[in-house]
Amino acid sequence: MDRATALTEAFLNTLSPADADLANLRQAVEEVARDVITVEKNDPDWAAARVLRRIVEPDRVISFGVTWTDDAGDVQVNRGWRVQASNAIGPYKGGLRFHPAVTLDDLRFLAFEQCFKNALTGLPLGGAKGGSDFDPSGRSDAEIMRFCQAFMRQLAPHIGPDKDVPAGDINVGAREIGYLFGAWRQMSGIYAGALTGKAPAYGGSEIRTEATGYGLIYFVQAMLARTGAAITGHRVAISGKGNVATHAARKAIDEGATVITLSDTSGTLYAPDGFDHAAIDWVVQRKAQGADLSDPPRHIAAQFCEGAQPWAQDADIALPCATQNEIDEKAAQALVDNGVQLLAEGANMPTTRDGLRVLRKARVTYAPGKAANAGGVAVSGLEMSQMSHRRFMSADEVDQALRTLMSDIHDRVATEGKGDGGIDYARGANLAGYRRLAQAITAQGVI
């Protein structure tokens, strides 16, 4: 057993027994610890401050009931959470997701990962995550509005522009952010940037909705540029059909790539010669209707593969943009067998440890989500700055700033991850994020 493995196992044994059953949190912590634990032990100040242990333990977990009435006048009860992980480098920042499968385990691991992701941006942003087990599918606009208002009644005392600034995530888009912000503004009696992802009409940033998907492509382009390559002409397999997947697909198409797949839980939409924007429009429309991707119209020149994953098709680049742990050992082997040379995560932690082992053995270049999908939070940071200064940037200005931010993130990660065998982007992301957090945490003492 090498030193890093031994130290990691010893560190995991120091975690709270209450966290023992939080499988996603433990997976995320273990992956980070293996990369940074020896760095911490080799720095006496960081070791004495127990930096990593303090990042794992959130500053607070806020749990609350959400009581609201549906259109029939019946009382409904849901649960909400906000995990405020660390504000050592800035106000808490991270999304809200509404989904019946949301658990505290999900939010704990996402808040932990958010600390590193936000640190990588170079912006003054702490880490947090939140959400509810509310299921918006089949609900009317009026029901969603009443739920958002009830949710904000519980969350409002804990957030603010210099305190905690939530954003959207799964099932929390522009509509939901509007309802949430309106409720917060009414309750607080002030107008300030307490949420990001707002529409430009009331203080939001241009291209915020597109930012995570666009940023993913910009990060991939930076990876390719290191070897003198470009994304033009590459075949790209993408999973998912949400904002990240569809905007990554649009940007990849615009940059000259051939996007061959999108997917949902029902199966994969496969276009051997590549999607065009009309096909992406159809996918977006289907999602808005709550429909799956089966039975595509003839004009989009794609076939639906029921129950199949996107990784069964020949591709050069894979962009998992659906959900965590979708790239297991079997999926990773399919990617390798079908010629994938680069994988960048658009979702949060979509690759399992076994899947990553397969990719590394095959020497597939791998970029973790905390680096590759940081574009969304980066533009959220820009939105916070624009809101504070009351000076708003054009879409072109934001897009150029996003390109620069993603290039800078890539360079930070590549510098930390550089070794004799090339660049280990996962290790580089963990180390770069950890160093910034460690410097801030130790500088501020034991508080």
Image (cartoon, rainbow, N blue to C red):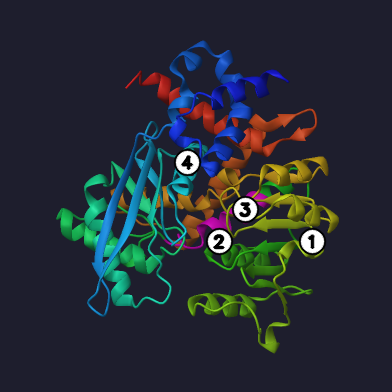
Which quadrant, please, contains the C terminus? top left
Residue at the image position 41 percent from the left and 63 percent from the top = 172
Distance of label 3 from label 2 (alpha carbons): 13 Å
Amino acid under disc 1: Ala
Distance of label 1 from label 2 (alpha carbons): 19 Å
Residue with the most extreme bottom position: 298
The kind of secondary structure element at disc 1 is loop
Q: Main secondary structure of the magenta part?
A: helix
Left or right: 50 in relation to 411: left
User: Does residue 217 belong to the magenta stretch?
Assistant: yes
| Between discs 1 and 4, the one toward the N terminus | 4
Q: Nearer the viewer, mark 1 or mark 3?
A: 1
Distance of label 1 from label 4 (alpha carbons): 30 Å
Amino acid under disc 2: Val
What range of the chain is rendered magenta?
A: 206-220
Distance of label 3 from label 4 (alpha carbons): 17 Å
Q: Return the residue at label 1.
A: 315
**How many neighbours does mark 2 have within 10 angstroms: few (below 14), some (14-19), or many (20 or more)?**
many
Left or right: 283 in relation to 162: right
Residue at the image position 42 percent from the left and 47 percent from the top = 104
Image vertical order of residue 333 relative to residue 427, above or below: below
Amino acid under disc 3: Tyr
Q: Return the residue at label 2.
A: 244
Amino acid under disc 4: Asn
Foreground residue, 140 or 397? 140
